[in-house]
Amino acid sequence: MAKGHEYAVLDIGSHKMRLLVANKCYSTFSVKAEAQVAYDGYANGKWVNEDSVRNAIKEVVAKVKGKDAKIKKLYVGVPAEFCTHKVVSASIQSIKRKKVEQSDVDALFITGNPFGDDKTLLVKAPEYFMVDNSKNRYINALGLPTQSLSGSLCYIATENNFVAFINDVLKRCQINETVFLCSTYSEMLSLFDEKSRQYGVLLVDCGYRSTSVSIMNGDGIIFLCSFSIGQMHLIKWIAQGLQIPYEVAAKLFQKVDLSLNSSSEATYSVEAEGGMMRFSCSKIIEMVSQCISVICNYVNKSLEKFNDYKITRLTINITGDGLRLRGIEACMGSKLGRSVKTVVPMKNSNYNNAEYSRAVGLIEQALDMDSKKTSWIW
């Protein structure tokens, strides 16, 4: 790896485009330049306004280049709403007994690939491998003696037109070399260590317009879905319920502490055009709690699609900037009937914030791919 090599990643959020250029720094990274631009986002797997996307990408690239950062190759994170996910079982047989080589693993992934030419493959990763039809499961099968190799393989892809659209915009910004990654996959590899993933981890990433629900086992995501509800909708419902402007409701939302006693007579004060507006803490807490119930109901409905009793024992990890509220873990835990924990990136103290979970994951996977530690991940 060349000294001083710069890694540029584009995190496509449902409200902001965030571009970071980072350098490897010992076991972590340092960010040389960062910029973010608000735009109209996406919902239900579609851009709200394609012109807004084009303008945001052009602006965020210009801002970073204005900070003397170089973008030779750009790693682009594809949001869950634009991803298709499948888990398949596949196997290959050799004529004589041999040790598993990388070429065997590659052949197995080619055999199992469920996607055609109309999609761009982002991730191919194992939930587990098996050799000689034994019941033993392995995350890494390299070097194991066998006559047959099989496994539960996880694939994530996006539509070719998504890639073509983003590439067209980037070429107009003089960026011609791109690598597309699944944002959720990069995020989960970053947030959870190998030992945790062996037992299964469940992540809910709530953003501004969209929320994703994912389960990772081993090195593969075995469940991935999203729904187009996020912080924006919670604030909108509060604004409608109180008959106040959205901007005032947004300020109020940021003040909420769900751990306060609901019988408290305290008030929240929010600055508005006509002066200060005051609201009963207990009333606002009750409203926000009801709004969060909607998110929790969608999470439960999502998990019902994954018919596996084992997920009932998993802690629900939450991240993203949509539910950054004091007392959120206890509130969601009571509604979901299980333990809830907020997770943030921990390897770089400047970015140990839930808002950066995807971006940090993308940086770490870019570094990892460059050092060829993840040979089966595209």
Image (tube, rainbow, N blue to C red):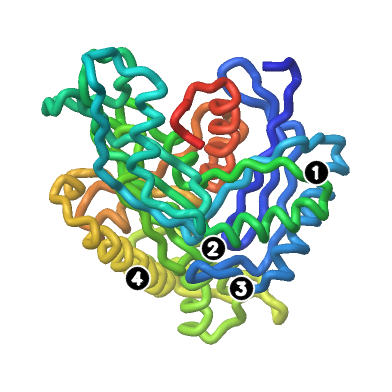
Crowding at dot 3, Cα within 10 Å, few <14 / some 14-19 / many 20+, comes out as: some
Which tag, 4 or 1, sits closer to the chain's start? 1
Q: Is residue 61 left or right of residue 42?
A: right
Residue 226 sits in which quadrant? bottom left
Kindly report which numbered mark, 4 or 3, lies closer to the viewer in this rendering.
3
The circle drawn on residue 48 is 3
Query: Relative to 257, is 156 above or below?
Result: above
**Residue behind mark 2:** 208
Q: Circle 2 sits in a helix, a strand or a loop, which is it?
A: loop
Residue at image position (49%, 51%) is 320
Kindly report which numbered mark, 4 or 1, lies closer to the viewer in this rendering.
1
Crowding at dot 1, Cα within 10 Å, few <14 / some 14-19 / many 20+, comes out as: many
Kindly report which numbered mark, 1 or 3, lies closer to the viewer in this rendering.
3
**Gap between marks 1 and 2 measured at Cα:** 23 Å
**Residue behind mark 1:** 64
**Gap between marks 3 and 2 measured at Cα:** 13 Å
Amino acid at pointer 4: Val
Amino acid at pointer 3: Val
Q: Is residue 257 left or right of residue 49?
A: left
**Residue behind mark 4:** 294
